[in-house]
Image (cartoon, grey):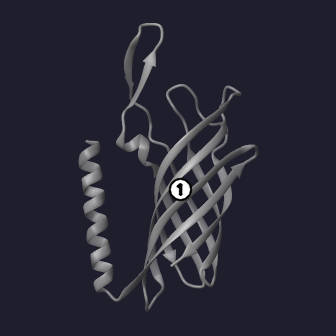
Amino acid sequence: MKKRLVRALFGGVVLVLSGSAVAHGNSGPRFFFSHESSGDDTITSIGTGITIVNGDSNLGFQLNTSIANAEILSDDGYIEDYFAWEGSVKVGLFSNISIYGEAGIDLGELLFDDYRHDYHDYYHAHYNDDIDAYLGFGAGVQLGALKVEAFSRVREIDSLYWEAQSESFSGVQFSLNF
């Protein structure tokens, strides 16, 4: 199931990219640094992405991937530290001033099964886990090659053993565009 979903997503991305290139769109790769928080919870990421924009209307989308480090307070009062490999899509107006909606998922949880060693029985157990995801919106300002964005996200963060206390995050992203 997961492999079919990845193939369908990858095939759709290639189709959309080639279709946008034909429709006189322009594209630009970028690297970014992002930091978001909710109280003491923090998620810091670095990543890369590409923007596809229709030159006539400035409507477009961004495809992004990032590696994130998170420190999240769980509902049982413990701080959970973890790394995530996230993928996201932003859709909106992209010009000197940008406004967009976005959706993202933890690609690591999507693509790889969660195996953990059970110390009581000395065997590896497979756990089905919900895939962490988020929805959000944001706005940004392009200053030459630098872009500064502010955003707000609602995140579903959990594992088999814990769930995050906070779901609402806000943050800032700095991008270097080529």
Residue name at image x 70 percent, y 51 percent: 37
Vertical position of residue 173 compared to residue 66: above or below = below
Q: Residues within 10 Å of mark 1 (few under 14, many from 20)?
A: some
Residue 19 lies left or right of residue 56; in this view the side is: left
Quadrant of the rendered image containing residue 78:
top right
Residue name at image x 53 percent, y 56 percent: 135
Vertical position of residue 52 compared to residue 118: above or below = below
User: Could you say which is closer to the camera, residue 74 or residue 81?
Assistant: 81
Residue 170 lies left or right of residue 84; in this view the side is: right
Residue 94 spot, x, y in % from top left: 52, 80
Amino acid carrying mark 1 in the image: Leu
Residue 153 spot, x, y in % from top left: 60, 56
Q: Report how many numbered discs are placed on residues in the image.
A: 1
User: Could you say which is closer to the camera, residue 33 or residue 100?
Assistant: 33
The residue beneath circle 1 is 135
Residue farthest along the right direction in this orientation: 39
Q: Dividing the image into 4 quarters, which one contains the N terminus? A: top left
Residue 15 lies left or right of residue 49; in this view the side is: left
Residue name at image x 28 percent, y 68 percent: 14
Residue 145 spot, x, y in % from top left: 59, 81
Residue 74 spot, x, y in % from top left: 65, 32
Element assignment for label 1: strand
Residue farthest along the top direction in this orientation: 121
